[in-house]
Image (cartoon, grey):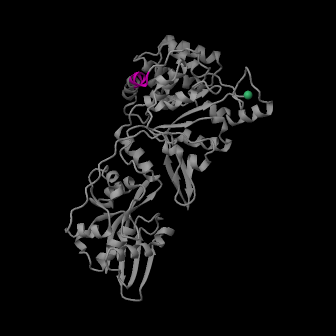
Amino acid sequence: MLATLRSATLVGIDGRPVRVEVHVSTGLPAYHVVGLPDASGRESRERVRAALLSSDLPWPMQRITVNLAPGGLRKTGAGFELAVAIGLLVAGEALPYSVVTDLGVLGELGLDGSVRRVPGVLALVDALRRAGVRRVIVPLANAAEAALVDGVEICPARTLAELRACLEGEADWPAIPALPPPSPDRGDGADSEEPLDLADVRGLPTARLALAASAAGGHHLLLVGPPGTGKTMLARRLPTILPELTREAALEVTRIHSVAGHAPTHTLASTPPFRAPHHTASTAALVGGGSGRPSPGEVTLAHHGILFLDELGEFAPSTLDALRQPLEDGVVRIARQGMTLAFPARFVLVACTNPCPCGLGARACRCDRAQRSRYGRRLSAPLLDRFDLRLPVEPSELGEPPGVASAVTREQVMVAVERQRARLCGTSWSHNARIPAGALERFVPLSAAAAEAWLLLSGARELTGRGSARIRRVARTLADLDDRDEITATDLATAGVLRADITVS
Ligand SMILES: [Zn+2]
């Protein structure tokens, strides 16, 4: 007796359909799983058996073969267990075949017959939908997330016994739980209860302008200054002025965080992610990889959002080097078991750093030459060059008035974002910062006067082509923030100030 069910496995952050074939035949009792399962797939026998017996359901004392197809695809995790258990019920005639025809099944089993959550349900259900499956059983804990996929009926499962009764029509399916309200993902373990606001930071008008430009135009931002200047406070408030994600981006972000096993929000993320890994984070934690199933790193968790690196100069040089590829390509490639996985990693890099190890900088520095040159090597020229916006931050004067509130700055950012969307509509570039140099003439035209100012500025600073292109993009964002079509010579001069020549050591 053969039963075939539909399921799916994760490859990177994508789901791939898998057929689960359960075959029961006469012969000595045995249990085999074939078709490239990983260790947890091979060990499924005990969990499936215990779950069936705990649920007062029969375990066939026969020869059981489970085949996971296609055979060439490596399957990860224990997410096939529920499909195997249902297949055994059908093969043992405890369930009619008709109820599982074209049924998608995702879920792990507890020894007590409970159905446990699996990572990446959004991607898995989406893969089944694309394969033509219209009805999918998922663990109740994953149901709200699964229901984000349009065009698929979601059947939530709590326990194996209840699931059997629902499939037989003896009981109603449990209701899909409501989505919890979205909460901004800060990624740094900080207490997200306390609302942050730019009004908390005094002074720093230039750094605030740079922050708004970064939020609107997607420009990488570096703030350099001694401790206590408020640069970190300012950067941490960036999420309060970011525009909401589009639905498409929100689905992608939710899908990535679901694959990473982030629980239990599983609502559609509407706020761009803000990830703030510590400087002791390993290269694998930052860019992805690790043993077993490769997991997305911080750069991927920050996709469509912000990667915030505080104390940039304290990160290991090899770790900072590993950022180069994602900064360049917007993607991380990880080679594993004869195949290459691609994780999306299109983020805005925001970083703070001290000017030198002691943090006091030129005026009062206590570092010796060796310390400073070591620090300088970490913040290599190629890395510093990536930042469209980089500026020194000096301590605010005492008695400066409280800053402008986040809500006010966010309005201004939204105006700029609308202009930018209209400009870049139909292109693959989401932000001014991503317009290629070759397309600047068309998308960031300059008047004759502005063009002259741009050439003078580039000449006076001896800027490379890349450097002056970065200034031109920032000037476009500054004009957008001011709700203007035309870029002025002042915009270009301000953009030049916002891209200061930072020398470390
Ligand atoms: Zn120093």
Tell which of 165 and 442 is nearer to you: 165
Q: Which residues are magenta?
A: 405-413
Where does the C terminus fall, quadrant-wise?
top right
Is residue 162 inside the magenta stretch? no
Is residue 409 inside the magenta stretch? yes
Check the image and name the residue furthest to the bottom: 27
Residue at the (55%, 42%) spot, across then down: 326
Answer with left or right where residue 149 lies relative to residue 192: left
Q: How many marks?
A: 0
Image coords of residue 351 (percent x, y): 58, 33
| Depicted 33 relative to depicted 417: above or below | below
Answer yes or no: is residue 257 visible: yes
Ligand 1 falls in quadrant:
top right
Quarter-of-image position of residue 459: top right
Residue at the (68%, 34%) spot, across then down: 380
Main secondary structure of the magenta stretch = helix
Answer yes or no: is residue 133 visible: no
Check the image and name the residue furthest to the right: 369
Tell which of 136 and 355 is nearer to you: 355
| Depicted 107 relative to depicted 22: above or below | above
| Depicted 464 relative to depicted 64: above or below | above
Image coords of residue 117 (percent x, y): 39, 59
Image coords of residue 133 (percent x, y): 29, 60
Where does the N terminus fall, quadrant-wise?
bottom left
Check the image and name the residue furthest to the top: 449
